[in-house]
Amino acid sequence: SSPDSDSSKPELEKAGLLNKTKISEGGRKLRKNWNQSWVVLTPSSWKPGNSRPESSVDLRGAQLEFADCLSSKKNVFKLRTVTGNEFLLQSETDSLVREWYNTIQGAGKPSGQR
Ligand code: I3P
């Protein structure tokens, strides 16, 4: 194994800029407020050290679907958590959105099903 796989360090799986808006909270519809966000995907064992996430989302059991019909923007997908919170995520870069979709899709499943 490489020096990078030092188990004392949290393993960062993916990070980048995406446009994000929350569209519902516990099943209740919210008014869209698109913002560019720095999105970091981390293992569930991860604990914030010096970084202070503005918000975090538990992806276990989350459902994803492409949802261009829910926005005037292109490359939009919807993330729905088991608690009924819904987010739209978007980027102008098609390939980037597909990468995030696939990575989040894998992260929300039990490891045997990825
Ligand atoms: C919303 C804003 C959003 C837009 C949304 C509008 O207006 O323009 O960007 O979503 O469309 O309602 P406001 O700023 O007055 O709240 P998209 O960019 O995703 O299209 P929607 O109501 O059709 O979702």
Image (tube, grey):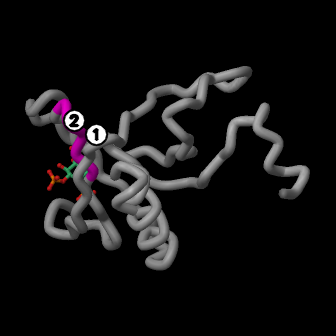
Horizontal placement of 97 versus 11: left or right?
left
Quarter of the image holding residue 106? bottom left
Q: Nearer the viewer, mark 1 or mark 2?
A: 2
Q: Is residue 102 above or below residue 56?
A: below
Residue 18 at x, y percent in the picture: 49, 55
Q: Is residue 107 above or below residue 48?
A: below
Q: Quadrant of the N terminus?
A: bottom right
SS under mark 2? loop
Residue 32 at x, y percent in the picture: 24, 42
In magenta, the rendered stretch is 79-83
Q: Earlier in the sequence, mark 1 or mark 2?
A: 1
Quarter of the image holding residue 76? bottom left
Quarter of the image holding residue 91? bottom left
Say what amino acid the circle numbered 1 marks.
Lys
SS under mark 1? strand
Nearest the eye: 73 or 100: 100
Report which residue position mark 2 lands on: 85
Report which residue position mark 1 lands on: 22
- Are the residues flagged by discs 1 and 2 in contact, CB closer than 8 Å? yes
